Image (cartoon, rainbow, N blue to C red):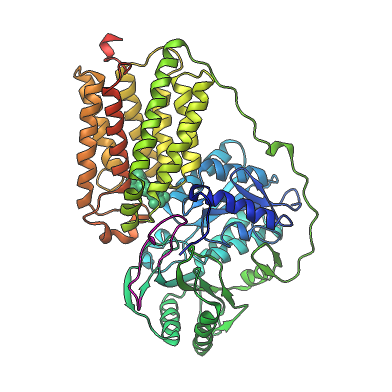
Amino acid sequence: MTRLWNDPADFADEMIDGFVAANERSVRRVPGGVIRSTVVPDGQVAVVIGGGSGHYPAFSGLVGQGLAHGAAMGNLFASPSTQQVHSVATAVDRGAGVFLSYGNYAGDVLNFDAAQARLRDEGIACETVVVTDDIFSAPPSERHRRRGIAGDLTVFRIAAAAAEAGYDLAGVTRIASLANERTRSFGVAFTGCTLPGARQPLFTVPAGRMAIGLGIHGEPGIEETDIPTADELADLLVEKLLAEIPESVDIAGARVVPILNGLGSLKYEEMFVVYRRISERLTDAGLVLVDPHVGEYCTSFDMAGTSLTLFWLDDELESLWETPVDTPAYRRGSVAAAARAEVAASSVVTAEAIERGDDDSVEVAALIRSALQVIVDVVDANVDELGRIDAIAGDGDHGIGMQRGSHAALAAGSAAADAGAGAQTVLAHAADAWADKAGGTSGLLWGVILNALAMQLGDAGRPTASAVAAGVTAAARGVHDYGKAEVGDKTLVDALVPFSTELAGAIDAGAAFTDAWTRAAAAATSAAAATSDLLPRLGRARTHGAHSLGTPDPGAVSLSLIVTAIGDLLTSTSTAPKASHHA
Ligand code: ADP
Ligand code: MG
């Protein structure tokens, strides 16, 4: 149970404020997350880590001398947005390029990849190693699909140590990939975690039972057993990991760092009892244990559970592992304190000038503002239900993610409209705010959808119905380009594609815009309902595919609710776009 919060929507933000206030010696806040508050020499590769909040000390607690240069911090259990990653990366770049590393989750991959593309466009070299240590989340033949859990620590530390030792970007990338290849983890859970303000845990494990194969976002376990004794659990963890020794390793005399990680509410004393047996078993297996870690390195809010990570060293990795570290949550060896960095003026955010629209476009902008309000209302009314269906096979954050995104979009769109912006500018501001504040996969995709639509609207004159239909078609194409989902993969694409096809078809056939939209919304609604029968093939839900049979895809449901509510708005208003042949 999580007990203390003010407004749950402000939790992550207020947590960052408090974290920075308590750790100014090491970190300072920038838009999108935190960076070191100490001087970093020019020409050093910048290591940027990140992910959702709720995993402390990952990720902000691992920023400081000898470890990460910055952390992009998403909302609770939600990936940081592209803008957040980009903002933190540009704040820490020292001219030698940026190295990105994070756990393998769909939303994080989309946003970090988009940030990497943007950095490269701007001439900043950027490389990425995604952490994939969780052996239970995909078979060995599909290692690239595995999630990242407590093994984050080894990859981040090795990358940062290499940067500190003067490796160039290619060198940091090479050694971090090797660290990831030689890091394997396996975990279990006894109780689910409860997000601030939520009435229910994201998932529950029956009393006396243990879920095997946990994820750090409260993804349900994949198998379940009775809770074993401490020694039996140690045996299970060790046996699973020794069954998957990296190919290049010879077990006899191999040197390995064991990391026994607590997920949030397991006692250190319990972990020491388990570690006692782990240590014996690994030593009996002929391993040499180096620098064992027992503690919390990557948590999942208040989840009770633990994971064991084995990091298989070679000479280069071991010498980098000896680099001293001093961060708010993690210290190793003794670090010579660096001077405090001056705060650069460039970190001050400047508001961009608003493009004013002509009278017709301003009228359309007012309709868009009403539509954004309608989206807020329908998302607010369904926030619990969207969270519930996302928790069945995903991580339970779809309701709150959509809520953050839609509220931010309304605020930014309204501010632009108040400044006299036309339709395109109002919607583009709303799109960027949605993507920035929502986090998660759906946040990025809603940013793509609204931006694609905005492009067709212009800031002068009234858009035709065909222009809006073309915008929706472009939105579907954009979502496909980013997320790579096809119809049938059980994503919001399953609702968006029928919506777009029906809308374009009806408008081509000469239907009035509002009628066409209403018919398209009906098609989206039945398609969203039909996703109940599908198995997911992408995204976080993939790992728990079978759980989701009988439950529709949350992103498809929210999309159908939104287009339906906008249909109702259009029906009750007279300013909808006209069919193209009237324009
Ligand atoms: P996250 O998956 O990061 O927790 P949300 O819970 O907000 O993000 O959104 C989940 C929804 O995102 C899914 O229900 C699905 O509709 C959509 N989604 C996930 N991955 C993709 C993808 N690759 N392409 C299209 N939609 C996707
Ligand atoms: Mg989710």
Image quadrant in which the C terminus is located: top left
Q: Position of residue 475 (x, y in %)?
A: 36, 32
Q: Nearer the viewer, residue 37 or 165?
A: 37
| Residue 169 in view, yes or no | no
* Quarter residue 138 falls in: bottom left
Count of numbered circles in the view: 0
Q: Position of residue 468 (x, y in %)?
A: 33, 23
Relative side of 360 to 162, left or right: left
Relative side of 162 to 119, left or right: right
- 500 w.r.t. 63: above or below: above
The residue sitting at 37% across, 36% down in the picture is 377
Relative side of 95 to 247, left or right: right
- 537 w.r.t. 469: above or below: below
Tell me which segment is drawn in magenta.
192-209
The residue sitting at 27% across, 28% down in the picture is 568
The residue sitting at 54% across, 63% down in the picture is 152
Residue 151 is a magenta residue: no
| Residue 157 in view, yes or no | yes
The residue sitting at 34% across, 34% down in the picture is 477
* Quarter residue 478 falls in: top left
Residue 204 is a magenta residue: yes
Q: Position of residue 114 (x, y in %)?
A: 49, 42
- 276 w.r.t. 558: above or below: below
Q: Nearer the viewer, residue 310 or 564?
A: 564
Label the magenta part by its dominant secondary structure. loop
Q: Position of residue 489 (x, y in %)?
A: 28, 48
Image quadrant in which the N terminus is located: bottom left
